Amino acid sequence: MQVIARFVAALFILLAGAAVPLQAATTAPPPAKVADIPASVASEAKGSLPVGFRSWKGDLDRMIKRRLIRALVPSSKTFYYVQNGRPSGISYDVLTAFERDLNQQLKTKALKVRVVFLPTPRDEIIDALLAGKGDVVFADMTITPERRERVDFSDPMYTGIQEIVVTAPGRPQVTAIEQLSGQQIFVRPTTSYHQHLATLNARLETEGKAPVVIRDAPEELEAEDVLEMVNAGLVPHTVVD
């Protein structure tokens, strides 16, 4: 497996007074469970969207005032999924704990601040945040210059994370980055992996070597899905961190 260094930031909400995950000029993303929506928010005018689903932007104080935090999260076996009617995953566990601690600090009683989870495709999650369709994003997302221009990140949970090339069973192990020349790599177009492979291809071209054949994976696939495909021999290589 070949290592390619990079920074990764998991976008997450810290407790009151700390950074709010990935806030775009006062917005962020959500996934939701109907039962989590307060009655005051769930009520809607006939023919209009519920308050929680309308475009809206505001900071944490304003979210608390309206007692609703919409969290945009990717659907995955790691971050957010629903099994037998029960939501689970890292995003759900962390933000549910945040909701509990926030209400304890605010000493709320009947009118609690609720976190509503809104599963959102990864290739749409930043756009949804910017459009006011969510208040925060909770996702494993690399901080890149391009993304920094669009949204605000929390402090990264981890730094010095490395990208590695994963090969299918029976294929030769990649021990040097030059060995990727002419090889097929299966990655989603919107990932930083894709950007780094394009940069590698520019270098290979100047060296007179064949470029990496980048095969675009569907945006609906999570890293764990692609890894299962590699393990089954359906695709020869992928890159993950």
Image (cartoon, rainbow, N blue to C red):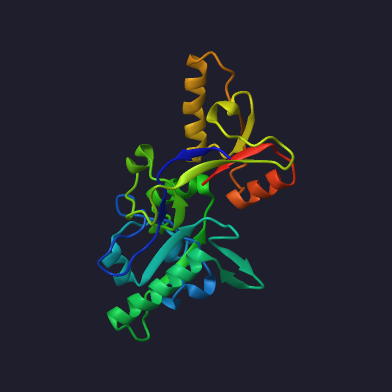
- Residue 116 picture location, percent across and down: 46, 67
Q: Residue furthest front?
A: 175
- Residue 80 picture location, percent across and down: 55, 62
Asked if 82 appears above or below 232 in the picture, the reply is below
Q: Is residue 56 left or right of residue 234?
A: left
Question: Residue 60 lies in what quarter of the image?
Answer: bottom left
The residue under the point 48% across, 15% down is 206
- Of the 4 image quadrants, the one containing the N terminus is top right
Asked if 221 appears above or below 59 in the picture, the reply is above
Q: Is residue 94 visible?
A: yes
In this rendered view, identify the residue nearer to me: 70 or 147.
Answer: 147
Number of disc labels: 0
- Residue 140 picture location, percent across and down: 46, 53
The residue under the point 35% across, 86% down is 109
The residue under the point 74% across, 46% down is 232
Q: Residue furthest bottom?
A: 109
In this rendered view, identify the residue nearer to me: 150 or 91.
Answer: 91
- Residue 121 picture location, percent across and down: 54, 50
Q: Is residue 179 left or right of residue 27?
A: right
Q: Is residue 222 visible?
A: no
